[in-house]
Amino acid sequence: MNKKVIIIAEAGVNHNGNIEMAKQLIDVAVNAGVDYVKFQTFKAETIVSPTAKKADYQAKNIVDDDDSQFQMLKNLELSHENHLSLIDYCNQKNIKFFSTAFDVDGVNYLDGLGLEMFKIPSGEITNYPYLKTIAQKNKPIILSTGMATLGEIENAIAVLTKYGANRETLTVLHCNTEYPTPMKDVNLKAMLTIGQTFGVQIGYSDHTLGIEVPTAAVALGASIIEKHFTLDRNLPGPDHKASLEPNELKAMVNSIRNIEKAIGGNGRKEPSASETKNIGIARKSIHLKNDLKAGSIISEDDIIALRPGDGISAMQWNNIIGKKLKLDKVEFEKLDWSDIS
C-alpha cells in the first residue's frame, strides 16, 4: 500500500469521565502527529447487563470494592454535550475526531454527528444487527478482529457486504483482546493471513506494551494502526496500564513515519542519490604495491586493492596482471588505463 498509514490514537475511556482530561488527551494526540483521536460512545444501559462483572484486567486496574462493569462504564460515559465539545475542540486543533459505538443506537448517533467512517470493535464482530446498521451507512469501515477466528471474520464481512458495505473501503485490523497483550500472543503474521484470505486492506490494533509491534505491522503492510494512549499509565481506569504515555505515542508516530519512508522505495536495487557520492570513497581500485619502472610486466605481487575507488576497479584485477607499464610509478600510486599497454 503506497498511501500514508492512518494512525488512530485511541483515547477511549482514558478521560476517566472528565471532559477536561479528554481535551488534554486531544492535545497529546495533536502533538504526536496522529491522524485521528478516538473516543468511545456508549450508554451503559444498552451495552452491558447490570449484573455483569468486570473483566480481570479491569478489576486489576481499578482498585475499588465495586466489581460491577455496569457502574464502571456508567462513570465513563460521554454525554451529547461532551461529544459536541470534543468535536469542536478537535476542529480547533485541526485533528479528526473519531469514536466507536457499541450498539445500534450509538451507530445512528455517530452517523448523525457526521463521522466519516465507522469502527467495529472486536466485541461486536458477532453482533448481526450492529453490523447490518453500520453497513447500511455506506461509509468506510474498520473492522477489528480480537478474539475472532477466520470463520467469524468471514461471517462478519458477509453481513457487511450483504447490506451495502464496499469491500474496497473496508479495512480489517488484526488484534488481540488482552490488555496488555503478551508478545507471544501477538501472532502478527495473522494480519497477512487476513489480507490474503479476504482480499481486503489490513491493519493492526495494538494492545502490547511499547511501540515495536505497531511499527513492525507497518513494515508488513498495515494501512491503519490503532493504539491506546493515556496522560499517565498510573491513573486509575481499565485501559491506562496498556496505553502509551505522551512521549511514547510521539515516538511511535515518528517510527511509523520513518518506516513508511524506508519501505516506500521503487524496489529496484540501485545506488540511491544519497549514497552515490560515497562509491569512490568506500570502494577500492588497483594501486601499486611497490615502485615499478616503465616497461615492467605487472605481476600479482606488484598490485594491491586500496581506497579510493576512483581508478581501475579491483574487479579488473586479472585484466591488469601481465600488462606492461608505460611509465615509472611509485609505491601506492593509483593505476589508470592510460598507464598500461
Image: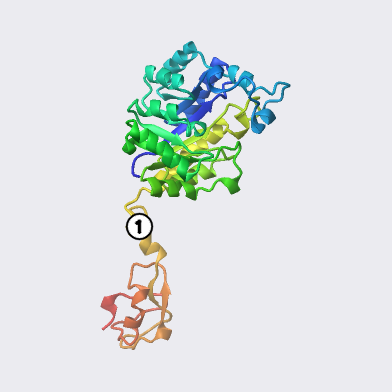
Q: Quadrant of the N terminus?
A: top left
Secondary element type, mark 1: helix
Report the front residue among 95 and 294: 95
Which residue corresponds to the image point at 36% horizontal and 25% vertical from the top-left? 116
Identified at 63% across, 18% down, the residue is: 71
Quarter of image, res 168: top left
Which quadrant does the C terminus fall into?
bottom left
Residue 47 on image: x %, y %:
54, 22
* Residue drawn at 34 percent across, 58 percent down: 271
Residue extending farthest to the top is 81
Q: Who is closer to the viewer here, 246 or 337?
A: 246
Q: How crowded is mark 1: few (under 14 residues within 10 Å), some or many (20 or more)?
A: few
Can you see residue 32? no
Task: From the viewer's perspective, tell me whether residue 53 is left or right of residue 118.
Answer: right
Toward the viewer: 223 or 187? Answer: 187
User: Does residue 327 show up?
Assistant: yes
Residue 90 lies, with reference to residue 288, above or below; the image says: above
Which residue is more in the foreground, 144 or 51? 51
Location of mark 1 (residue): 277
Where does the image place residue 331, in percent across and percent down from the top left?
A: 42, 78
Residue 328 image offset from top left, x and y in percent: 33, 82
- What residue is shown at x 31% (from left), y 82% (from top)? 319
Q: How is this picture coloured?
A: rainbow
- Against 218, is 89 above or below? above
What amino acid is at disc 1?
A: Lys
Total number of numbered discs in the rendering: 1
Instruction: State the image coordinates of residue 77 (x, y, percent, origin top left).
Output: 55, 17
| Left or right for 326, reference 263 | left
